[in-house]
Image: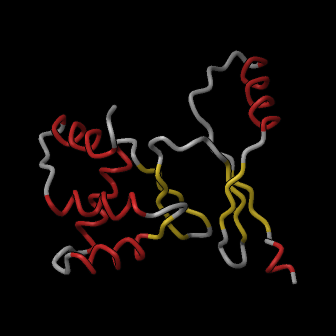
Amino acid sequence: MLDEHDIFKDYLKQYNLRYTPQRKLILDVFLQQSGHVHIDDIHIRVRDQDPTIGIATLYRTMKLLVESGLAEMHTFNEKTTYERLFQVRHHDHLICIVCDKTVEFEHPLIEKYQLEACERYDFTLKSHRMTLFGICKECQK
């Protein structure tokens, strides 16, 4: 079975790009994170292991990870985060507009109603994103 490294190598090869030690390290650090990770957090961890890797290399590599289908970029409240996609179940998001807390959730009725809407309008669903913005319990206090 293919893992993230195999998928990334194949993607890079397809576009005649190299699987460099820097790209491997960035992928490794990204895969060690869970949930939604800010680029600065990835950068700190990457620089701890290799101080020569700059932010531009990190941004370019994260762009390649998104293009290869291994990561998804989200911009919530004008802040960009990255999330793993490979072998991760579909979910939607609740975002606190005060503290930027992100809650991942699933609900079978949401999925059901989306499919019903697609059938009603003769639309073939390929993917979707649902993001709800509000104020979390802690920030309401």
| In front of the other: 44 or 2 | 2
For the point 72% across and 23% down, which residue is it?
118
Quarter holding residue 109: top right
* Scheme by which the image is coloured: secondary structure
For the point 16% across and 38% down, which residue is it?
13
Quarter holding residue 25: bottom left
- Residue 56: x and y in percent read 25, 69
In the rendered view, would you say 115 is above or below 135?
above
Farthest residue, direction front: 1
For the point 62% across and 20% down, which residue is it?
124
Q: Quadrant of the C terminus?
A: bottom right
- Residue 49: x and y in percent read 24, 76
Farthest residue, direction bottom: 141
Farthest residue, direction right: 141
- Residue 101: x and y in percent read 67, 71
**112 left or right, relative to 101:** right
For the point 77% across and 26% down, which residue is it?
117
**50 left or right, relative to 84:** left
- Residue 99: x and y in percent read 68, 78
In the rendered view, would you say 126 is above or below 13?
above
How many marks overall?
0
| In front of the other: 77 or 30 | 30
**24 left or right, relative to 94:** left
Q: Quadrant of the N terminus?
A: top left
In the rendered view, would you say 125 is above or below 5?
above
